[in-house]
Amino acid sequence: MAHHRGEGTKTTRFFDLMNLLSSAPRSRRDLAERLGVSFSTITRYLQDLERMGYPLEYGRGSRGEALVSLKKVELPFSREEIVWLYNAALLMAAHLDRECALAAGMLAKIADRLTVAPSWFRALLREEADRMRSRRPSSPPVDEIFNTVSRAWLEGTMIELTYQAPHKPEKTYLCGILGIRPNLVGRSYYLITWCPELGDLRTFRVDRIRRVRQQGFTRFEPPRGIDLTARLSSAWNVWWGEEEEEVVLRFSRDVAYRVVETQWHEREEKAPQADGSIIWRARISEPREMLPWIRGWGKDVEVLSPQWLRENLAQEARAMYELYWGKCGEK
């Protein structure tokens, strides 16, 4: 591995450090030289890895020098389970639109420990790990923010975050983390939190968090009666509100088979019609989050209710007509 001489983010150096520790036992001085950081920085990185749950092994070399390595633990998956694991990796890779060294490192370590898998299959997992590392560079603050909120969630501590919503000034919140969820449409991640000052749940898009600080000595105890799974059961993805609205859509016969063969929401109901179309309905707490999905069906879907959602799509349709035909009179 090439020496970095201080280049790269801390997240990238963590990835390289774990690769070095996985390949062979090494001294701290050797690790520091290869990564281009100080001896004290390597010591701190090793402490961080242990705090994050990585099993390290310590020993002595032939000359008596202290060595450290990453303990290898075999993963007891069946052959059928590793195929599901591979597909999960593909979904994760497709969701990421930026480089993610930690996710790539995780996948590479899984590949090393899947002893039940043939070598060509492990190579596929390593290729996906390389793809994750070859995407456009991620903003270092976003990487560090994601790592900080992940640690706070797992360790059960409060965080102080500064958030900037679109077209609004920055605002600071003190909150505890209830979950981190992907947004399946926007290729982003959302932090679901409880804010004691507001006495309510708040959702924050991770890449809009400007600064975050873990309140290491302040434990977070989720309020009694907060059932995140139940709250999200009425959400289309990660947005929710106090009230649910019934969304009713009519899909044309041309796409009816696609609507029927997939479960789009756990609360959905589908009713085939005599003309071959499908009436789809579900109670959704924030129907506005459905708009990208509805738009994707084009002319093959009609919003029947709620009325405000129907009018919203109708206005968009008129605007598109003006864009493509209205101004130039194109046919």
Image (tube, rainbow, N blue to C red):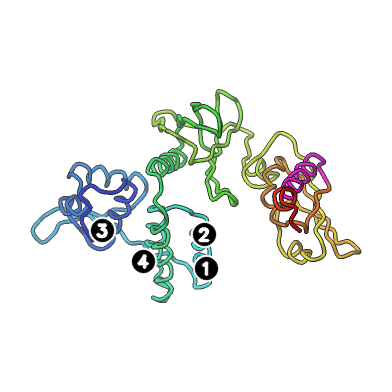
Magenta-colored span: 305-322
Q: Which residue is mark 4?
A: 112
The amino acid pointed to by label 1 is Glu
- Is 248 one of the magenta-colored residues? no
Characterize the local packing of mark 2: few (<14), some (14-19) or many (20 or more) Cα atoms within 10 angstroms.
few
| Precedes in sequence: disc 1 or disc 4 | 1
Residue that badge 3 annotates: 20
Q: Earlier in the sequence, mark 3 or mark 4?
A: 3
Q: Are marks 2 and 3 in contact (CB under 8 Å)?
A: no
Q: Secondary structure at mark 4?
A: helix
For the residues bearing labels 1 and 3, Cβ distance under 8 angstroms? no
Nearer to me, 315 or 142: 315
Residue type of the residue flagged with mark 2 = Ala
The amino acid sitting under disc 4 is Asp
Residue 306 in magenta stretch: yes
Asked whether the residues under the numbered discs 2 and 4 touch, taking CB atoms below 8 Å apart as contact, a structural biologist would say: no
Which of disc 3 and disc 2 is earlier in sequence? 3
Distance Cα–Cα, label 3 vs label 4: 13 Å
Q: Pick out the residue farthest to the top.
A: 197
Which element type, helix, strand or loop, lies under badge 1? helix
N-term-proximal mark, 2 vs 4? 2
Give whichever of discs 2 and 1 has the lower sequence position: 1
Q: Which residue is mark 2?
A: 94
Residue bearing the label numbered 1: 81
SS label for mark 3 = helix
- Residue shown at 72% from the left, 57% from the top: 297
